[in-house]
Amino acid sequence: MKTITTQIPALDKVVRICDYLSDKNGATFSQIYQDVGIAKSSTSSLLNGMVAHGLLRQDADKYYLGLRLYEFGNKAVEQYDIKKIALPVLSDLRDKTNLTCHLGVLQGSSPIYLTKLESPQAIIIRSWEGKRLSLHSSGLGKVLMAWLTDDEVDALLPDDQQLQRFTDTTITDKFKLKQALAEIRVKGWAYDDEEDSQGVRCIAVPVRNPQGKVIAAISMSGVAFQIPDDKREHLASLVIEAGKRLSLQLK
């Protein structure tokens, strides 16, 4: 995840610790200050304060994210009206396709799922509300980037950062990724061809505010045989219809 620096260093450090622990099953004091890159004395004070406020919990010699963050997250989702507006649209799309449907937004430098409606079929796609995704390999990430300016894309994916390969089809070259984003703008939808997770495909479309700005995305996911090549265009048309319907409801 991209590190954001503000004029409040202490706050930046707290967020960096939270970001670090969000990808770990707990971490020790030594692991945190060494991997996050914060001075030993500052790390000790920050960890103690975060535990006191419930942002972290300590179990033996390890620190974990605290339940107060979970409470904040639930409140944030409750206050995000687009989620409530989107539920009937996603429900209709799920019923038409029998596939897992998501609503996501770009939060900082990461796409994040706001809502998930599970497929009624036996095959389950491993995702959850609040899950962060890869920008360059997920359908949701690519569609949220597609209508950004080149400068904005460069800020999210700096040249000095190698695009991580997850599968054989992951786009790891930034120039090729920008070409793919241009194609998405022409088609109006993004496709994840097992780029983020082997065997899983995804179709994603933008959701726009009344000014036409892309503020969210709807995606539909399934295993490869659920989104075969010969049905891809038809399924994409259903997701596009859902994206347009939600965009109209936001006006």
Image (cartoon, rainbow, N blue to C red):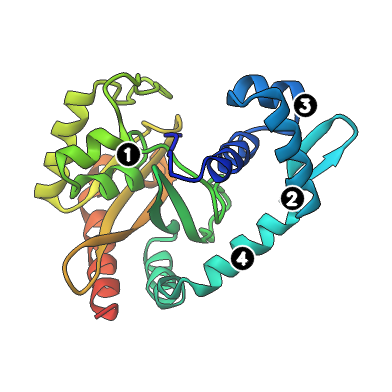
Nearest to N terminus: mark 3 or mark 1: 3
Side (left or right) of 198 relative to 176? right
CA–CA distance between discs 3 and 1?
36 Å
Inspect the image, locate mark 4, and give the three-letter code of the amino acid beneath it.
Asn
User: Is the residue marked by circle 4 packed among few (<14), some (14-19), or many (20+) residues within 10 Å?
Assistant: some
Nearest to N terminus: mark 4 or mark 3: 3
Inspect the image, locate mark 1, and give the three-letter code of the amino acid beneath it.
Asp
Inspect the image, locate mark 3, and give the three-letter code of the amino acid beneath it.
Thr
Which of 74/141 is in front? 74
Side (left or right) of 205 relative to 86? left
Residue found 60% across the figure and 60% down from its top: 73
Inspect the image, locate mark 2, and give the three-letter code of the amino acid beneath it.
Gly
Q: x, y percentage for residue 203?
A: 31, 49
Q: Are marks 3 and 1 in contact (CB under 8 Å)?
A: no
Nearest to N terminus: mark 1 or mark 2: 2
CA–CA distance between discs 1 and 2?
33 Å
Q: x, y percentage for residue 192?
A: 32, 39
Where residue 134 sits, quadrant-wise, is top left
Q: Is residue 163 above or below residue 68?
A: above
CA–CA distance between discs 4 and 3?
27 Å
Q: x, y percentage for residue 105?
A: 38, 56
CA–CA distance between discs 4 and 1?
28 Å
Q: Which mark is residue 192?
A: 1
